[in-house]
Image (spheres, coloured by chain):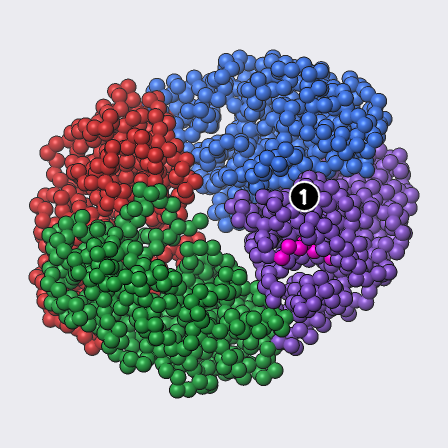
Chain colours: A green, B purple, C blue, D red
Amino acid sequence: MYNTINFDKLKEECGIIGIYAPGIDNISQLAYFGLHSLQHRGQESAGIAANKNGEIHYYKEMGLVQEVFSDQIIERLQGDIAIGHVRYSTTGESYVANAQPLVVHHKGGAIALAHNGNLVNANEIREALEDQGVIFQTSIDSEVIANMIARHHKLGIENAIKETMDQIRGSYALAITYKDKLIGVRDPHGLRPLCIGKIDGGYVLSSESCAFNVIGAEFVRDVEPGEIVIIENYKIKSIRYAENMKRALCSFEFVYFARPDSVLDGQSVYVSRRNAGKMLAKEHPVEADLVIAVPDSGTVAAIGYAQESKIPFGEGLIKNRYVGRTFIQPDQRMRERSVRLKLNVLKDNIKGKRLIMVDDSIVRGTTSKQIVDLLKSAGAKEVHVRVCSPPVKYSCYFGIDTPTRKNLVGAVHSVEEIRKMIGADSLGYLSIEGLIKSTSMEGCSLCTACFSGDYPMEVPKQGNKYLFEKR
Amino acid sequence: MYNTINFDKLKEECGIIGIYAPGIDNISQLAYFGLHSLQHRGQESAGIAANKNGEIHYYKEMGLVQEVFSDQIIERLQGDIAIGHVRYSTTGESYVANAQPLVVHHKGGAIALAHNGNLVNANEIREALEDQGVIFQTSIDSEVIANMIARHHKLGIENAIKETMDQIRGSYALAITYKDKLIGVRDPHGLRPLCIGKIDGGYVLSSESCAFNVIGAEFVRDVEPGEIVIIENYKIKSIRYAENMKRALCSFEFVYFARPDSVLDGQSVYVSRRNAGKMLAKEHPVEADLVIAVPDSGTVAAIGYAQESKIPFGEGLIKNRYVGRTFIQPDQRMRERSVRLKLNVLKDNIKGKRLIMVDDSIVRGTTSKQIVDLLKSAGAKEVHVRVCSPPVKYSCYFGIDTPTRKNLVGAVHSVEEIRKMIGADSLGYLSIEGLIKSTSMEGCSLCTACFSGDYPMEVPKQGNKYLFEKR
Amino acid sequence: MYNTINFDKLKEECGIIGIYAPGIDNISQLAYFGLHSLQHRGQESAGIAANKNGEIHYYKEMGLVQEVFSDQIIERLQGDIAIGHVRYSTTGESYVANAQPLVVHHKGGAIALAHNGNLVNANEIREALEDQGVIFQTSIDSEVIANMIARHHKLGIENAIKETMDQIRGSYALAITYKDKLIGVRDPHGLRPLCIGKIDGGYVLSSESCAFNVIGAEFVRDVEPGEIVIIENYKIKSIRYAENMKRALCSFEFVYFARPDSVLDGQSVYVSRRNAGKMLAKEHPVEADLVIAVPDSGTVAAIGYAQESKIPFGEGLIKNRYVGRTFIQPDQRMRERSVRLKLNVLKDNIKGKRLIMVDDSIVRGTTSKQIVDLLKSAGAKEVHVRVCSPPVKYSCYFGIDTPTRKNLVGAVHSVEEIRKMIGADSLGYLSIEGLIKSTSMEGCSLCTACFSGDYPMEVPKQGNKYLFEKR
Amino acid sequence: MYNTINFDKLKEECGIIGIYAPGIDNISQLAYFGLHSLQHRGQESAGIAANKNGEIHYYKEMGLVQEVFSDQIIERLQGDIAIGHVRYSTTGESYVANAQPLVVHHKGGAIALAHNGNLVNANEIREALEDQGVIFQTSIDSEVIANMIARHHKLGIENAIKETMDQIRGSYALAITYKDKLIGVRDPHGLRPLCIGKIDGGYVLSSESCAFNVIGAEFVRDVEPGEIVIIENYKIKSIRYAENMKRALCSFEFVYFARPDSVLDGQSVYVSRRNAGKMLAKEHPVEADLVIAVPDSGTVAAIGYAQESKIPFGEGLIKNRYVGRTFIQPDQRMRERSVRLKLNVLKDNIKGKRLIMVDDSIVRGTTSKQIVDLLKSAGAKEVHVRVCSPPVKYSCYFGIDTPTRKNLVGAVHSVEEIRKMIGADSLGYLSIEGLIKSTSMEGCSLCTACFSGDYPMEVPKQGNKYLFEKR
C-alpha cells in the first residue's frame, strides 16, 4: 500500500527503550515520547509493553510511533515499568506478528523483551529447540531468546538471562521487563549501543542518548559490552557475563544511523561526523567553489569539510520536508525523476560553480547518479563527490539490512568505475582509518566489517543470512 | 469503542472451516464465503490461513468477516488448502493475539490450527509444559494443542495428533493444515459439531452444514466423535482414537447457536426447533389469542407452538435489521429503553390480546422483563412467556460463555420467582426430556449439563474456569 | 469499493427526522437513534444538523448511521433543534456533496434542510435561477429549495417557505430548521409520508412513526398534504398552502419501503401487508402444501396468505443476517450463486412439497428465478409465486429509484412470459384494486403510478428524469 | 484529535496549482506531485479538480496531500485540465466544506476555483448578494468570487472574470478551470505569488516555482499583478485589468513562507534569505564564537550571518525530523518541554560558547524563551538572538493568519522588553529597509504592512477581520 521513495541508505533494524519509574502515572507516555525520538531507527512498527506488578499489557502495530498510539491506548498501558520498540521499514511484506516488544508467559509469569540486533546462531538454537518440540510463532530472534530464558527459569531470572547470553552469539541490545525488574543487556562486543539515564524516581534505558532530553532524563553511562544491568528497588545492579572481548561498536551508527545529538560510548555523533568531514577534506582535497551536502545526512560532514578546506559551505540542494511514506505510485515518467520529489536544486547557488558534494555513504549507487545529474543540469560546472565512509563491500550480520553483495556497488566496482557510473568529476571515499580516527576511538572499538570484511566473530555462510525470515 | 446492545443470550465461542482443493485458484475466497455463513458463531475476530506447499500465509483481525477481509488480502492468501475461524464477541477487552487460526512453526514445518471448543485440562497441561520451559504467547487452548503436537513431532503428524488427543480433555472441533494435509478432529463426546462436505476436486470441513450451500459443497457426513479425518491426495482417511464414549453434542446448538438451516449429527436444527415449540405447547398449554416470537431466535419454535396449540401465529415484535455493533454510547435515558433499539411492538396486532410470547432461552433474565413491559404497555391483555429450553442453571466448561452461577437467573430463582420478576402472566420452560425429544436424538446423545449439571466428564472446580484468560 | 448483493427491489430515496426540544442535553443523540430506526429508507449517507440559537453545526458522511457517527461527533452537535437525514445506496458513484441535511447561510442566517422526495420541475427552476446568476454546488433538489427560500427572504421565513412551496412541484417531505424554529412540510398530494410526535418538552417530525418508540415519543398526527407545520415556543402552528388536492401517498410505502411497525396516514403497514396477503390468496388461490415467504419483506404477506388460504405457513428460506455491504468481489463462480449468500433453503421443510412462495414485488425479475431454482433443486415439487403488488410498469418521478422501463420486467413482458422466465409453476400478482383495498384507504388516497402510469401530476418526458444527476 | 506542537510562526493560508495538458493521461498525478511540493503552504486540507471536456470531477479532504489521495482516487480524476489546492492548518475546528478547489455549476457549466489570499471586501459583497437572495455554503472567499462570476455569465467567462476582479479587493492568486480553459489571476498589487511554467504539450500555474522541477516543467514567467492569463488551445492569452498599481508582494513570503528553492517575482528566496542574514550581521554585529540557526527556517540566514560576520557557522540545535501532526496529548510535564520534542541541543558544540542564534521571525515570542533556556542550560555562555525580519506589529488582512495585536509581542513590547522576556543576552531585529534590500527589490514592490502598518489598500477595521469565519 505504501510506496516509499527510498534513498540509497542502509537500514538500521531497531531502537529500544526501557523505563523504570514506579509510582509515576504516565510511564507509557514517557515511553511514547522516548520511542518517538528513536523513530529514525525504525519506521515499520512500534510497540510498548507496560508492566504493572508483573502483569504486562502491550500494544504494537505497523506504522510510525505517532500513527500507532493514541491517547486512549497510552491510557490503557499503565504500569511501573515500560519497554518500547521501533522496527525498520522494509519495502516488502511485513507482519505485525514480528513487531516488538515480544510478550510471553513462562513459568515465572509474563515477560516482555525488546531487541535491537541480530543473532548469528539463532538458527542453530532454534533448530535444537524445535528438535525438542518447541514451536515458534514469529521469525524474530527475540522469540529464540525468550525460549532460552524460559528453559532456564528454574535458575531464577538473572541466572536464566546470564545462561542465555552465554549461549547466543551476535549483536544485541535488550530491554526486558519481568515482575518488578527492568533489565538491560548488551552483547559482549557492544555492537549495538545502549545507555542508561536517570529520571525523577527512576531509570531509563535507551538505544541512544537523544531520547533522554525529551523525557527529562540525564545521561548516566553506557551499558558496557557483556553487561547485564538489573534495575529494581530504585537501584541498578550490574552483572558482567563476558569480559575482555574486543569492543566493536557498529561504525555505521556514527556514519548514518544514530541521531547527531546522541553520544555513543562517550563519543558525540555530531562531532565524529564533523571530524569525518575534516578528515575527508585531508584525504581527498580538490579545488572547488562550494561545499554542499546531500541533506540531511551529509550536512554535518559537509560543514566539517568546508571548515578544513576553507572552501565555503552553502546549500545546493533543498529537501522537501513533507516527503513521507504514502506516495501515489508514480508512473514511469515520475519515477525517473523520483529524487526530485525529495530534493530540489538551488540553481542560483550552484550555477557555474565547481561543487564538492558530501554524502554520508554510497550503498547501491542508485541515487548518486540522479543527484549529480540534477546538479549538472542546473548548471554546476564540476561535481566532486566526497563520501564520509569507505565503500560498503560486505554484508552485515549484526542487525543492519545490507543488500546482497552483488548489489553493493563498492563490492563489485572500483572507485573509478563508480565515479564514471555516477557521472562525478572526481570521487573520494573516507578511508577506514580516517573513519576510525574521526570517532576518536581506538581502532579496536569499532566494527568496520561492512567495509573490511573483518567480522568480530564467526558469521554464517553467505546465503544463510536470512534463513529465519524465509521460513 | 464498540457498544453492543446485548440481548440475554449465551455466546458460542467459535466457528471453523477447512477447505482442501488443490489446483483451485480461489481457495481463500471459498474460505471467506464459508466463514461468512458461520458468522453467527463468532463476531469478535476472523482469520484465514492458506497453505501452499507447506508454506502458510495468514491474516486475522478483530471484526466481522466482511470487515476483516478485502479483495487484496484474499488475493494474497493463495494455496491448495485453507482453514478459517470466527471468534465470538466479548463485551470486554479482546486481543488480536487471541484470534485464530493459530499458525506456528515446528520441527516439521508450518502448521495452522483452528479450534472450536474448550479444554478442561488445558491448565494442567500448560503448567506442565511451562515447567519444562515452554512459553505461551496467547491464552487460547490452540496454543496448548500446538505445543503438544510439536512435542510429539518425531511420531509423524498423524500419531502426534493422535497422541495429543489422548491427552487433552474437553470439547473440540479442530481444523488443522500441515504440508499437503487438511485434518479434522472432533472430541470423543462430539460436544462441538463438525461435518464434511465435498466440492469439485476437494473437501470441506465446517462447524455447520449451512456453509456448504454457499460454496457449492455437498454434505457427506459428520466427523464422528473421537475421529481424526485426514484429507490428502484427494482422499479421506479416518482414524478413531476414542471409541464407545457417551455422545454428548451440545444441546444449545439446537436451542440457539446453530443456524436453522444446518443439520447436526443428522438432525435438522429447524425441525428440532419447531418440535421444541410443539413440545412446549404440550407441556405448557394456555388459553390465548396469539402466539408471537421474540425475533429472530424464537420464531421457529413459535410457529411450532402455534401449530400444536392451534392458536394463530402472528408477529408482535419487529426487529430493526440494522442493529449492529457500533452504537453511540446511549445515555441513561436511552439505555433504559435499549431493547427498543432492536425491537418494536406492532400495537395493532396485539392490542387487547392474550399473547403467548415464545423465546428460545432465558439466561440472566434481563431483557425478558423489558419485552413483557413493552407488550403490556402497548395494550397486550396477558403475556404468557414460553421458553424453548429448560432453565440454565450450570456453567458450561465446553466452549460456551456462561455467566457465573449467581448471574444465572435459573440457578438462583424458582420459576415462579422469575415469572414475577419479568412480569409475565405465566411462565413455562421446556423440560429437559422435551428438549431431547425435540431433537429426535436419544437422550445419551446430547449434553444437557447447563440445565442439569450432569457433565459428560469431570470439570474444573468453579472459579478456575477462566484461569487462562485471567493470566 | 463496496459490492452489495442487491436483491430485486425498488429503492427508497430518503428518510428524515426533526427534533425540537430546547433545553434537552442530548438532542443529537435522539436524532441519531431516530435516524437509526429510519435506516431502511437510505443506506448511502447519513447526516445530522444541530441548531443552537440559530447557529448550525452539522456532520454528514457516506455510510450507515452507525458508521457515520461517533460519540465524539454527537457530542459536538449541541443544540435545541436537530434535523437528520438518511439517503439511499446507489450502486454507482456517490458523493458526500450530495449528502443531507443541506446547510446554507442566507440573509436571515443559517438554515438547514432535509428532503425526502423528488421535484419534477427542479430542472426548470434551476435553469431559471442559473439565468439569474445563481450557482449550484450539488445535484440535490434541496439546493433548489434553499435558493427559492433565500430569494424570498424578505417575506419572512414562513411566507418564503409558503411562496417556495407554491412554485415547486413533485413529492417532498421536508424538515427545516432556522433560528428557533423546526418546520415540516409535506407536498400537496402527500406522496411522501411525514408525521408528528411528542416528547418531553418538545416535538418530533419523522418520515415514519417507527422512529417514535425508540426515542420515547408519542404519535400525534400526520402532517397533512399541503401543510406547513411550524414548531416554535413549544407550540405547533399550521399553515395550509394547498387544499383540495388529490391525496396520493406512495403505495410502495405499504408494499415494501416502510417498516411494518409504522403507521402511515392512519394505516398500519403491518396490517396492510397482511391484508395484501389475504387478498392475494383470494385473487390467486392455488392448491399447495406450504406457504413460504421470501424473507424478510414477504413474510407478513405470506402469513396473511396462509391465514386466508388455510394452507400452513412455514419457513422455506433462511436469511443470513450478516449479509452486509462489504463483500469480497465474488468471482463468476460465486456470482452465479450470489443469492445463496443471502438465502439458504430448509430442505427438510420443503422437500416433495407444493410451495406457495410469497414475495412483495418483482422489479427486474433477476432474483426470482434464482430463488425458484434454489427451491426446486432442493426438492420442491411445485413453486407457485405470488406477488403482493401489481407488476411494476412505469418509472417513478417522485423519489423512488426505478430502472428504465426496458428493465422493468412487468413493462416488457406478460405475466405468462415472466412465469416462464422465472421457472414458476404459476405466477399471480395482486391487482391494483386489491392493493388499494388492503390499505383500507380509498382509491384516491394512494399513488399507484408505477403500476398504472396514472401520475398524480404532469411528469417530465422519459429520459429527462435524472437530468440533474447527470450534469 | 490532532495536537500539533506549534512553533511560533505565522501561517500561510494556501497554495494553488493548475495544469493544462490536453491528451496527457496522468494530469491529476502531475497535480498531485505539484501540490505535494506546495505542501508547506497549507497542511489542513488538499483537493484536486479535473476537467474533462467541461465536466469536472473533484476530490478534497482534510489532511496532507499524501494522506488525502490514493492511486484509486487519482485514477478517477481524469481530464485535460486540473487545478489543486492546499490549505493551512488551524489549531481549531476546521471543515471539509471549506476545503478547495470549489466546484460549482453555473449557467455556462461547471467551474472550479482555487484561491490563495484574502478579500477585504468579501463581507460587503456577500451581504449585497445575500440581500438579493443568494445562499452560501462555505465561509471561503472563493464562493463569493464564484457567485460574482456567475452573476456576469452573460458576458462570457473572460469578461465575467474581469468584471469580478474589478469588484473584489484584497489579495488573490486564482487558478480557475472552465470548459477548455485554465485561467490564472493575480491581484493588482501582486500580494500573493503566482507563476507560469511550461511542460510537454501544456502549461502549469503554481504559487511557487519549486513545484515545476518535480513535474518536469520549466519556468516561463510570473503572472503580473492585475493580469488574467487564459490558457486554451495550447496558447496563453493575457488580459490586464488593472495597471499602474503599487506592487506589493508579501514580504513574509521571503522571510518564511516560500520554499528557499522558489523564485518569486524574479528573486530567489534562498538568496534573499542569505542576504537578510548578511544584512542582519551588519545591522546587529556582536562578538561571538558560533552562529547557529533555529532549524530549519533560520538556517539560510544563519549561513549568511556567518559569512558576513566571519564567525563560524555550526549546528547547535538538531530537529527531530519525525515531528508530525499526530501527537499524544502531552500532560503538563511534557508540555513544559514541548520544544524538546522538536529540537535537541548539541551540547558538545555549544558548551562554553558565545552563540548567535538566528531565527526568521518572532511572532508571539513563546518558543524563543524555551530555546534560549535550552541553550543556556546546555552550557552556552551567551545567547545573542538575531531575527531576520522586523518585529511583527500589525495584523495581516491579505491571507496570513496573524494573532490579534495584543498577542503580537512586537506590538506590545519594546525590543529590550522582549530581550528580557526571552532571556537573551542581546536581541537584534532586521530593519524594514534591510529586509527590502535583502530581496533586491525596490521598496515599492513589497508589502511590509505587518511590520509597518502601511497597508497597500484600505483594510477593514480591527475586529471585523474574520467576520465570515465566525458566522
For disc 1, the marked residue is B201
Q: Residue B117: x and y, percent?
A: 72, 58
Viewer-nearest residue: B448 or C304: B448
Q: Is residue C238 left or right of residue C342?
A: left
Main SS, magenta region, reads strand
Chain label for disc 1: B
Q: Is residue D323 above or below residue B266?
A: below
Q: Quadrant of residue C27?
A: top right
In this figure, what is the number of numbered marks? 1
Q: Quadrant of residue B171?
A: bottom right
Q: Residue B147: x and y, percent?
A: 65, 67
Determine if the magenta segment contains residue A391.
no
Q: Which residues are magenta?
A: B179-185
Give the residue at x 61% y 40%.
C324
Give the residue at x 51% y 39%.
C1
Q: Is residue A330 above or below residue A53?
A: above
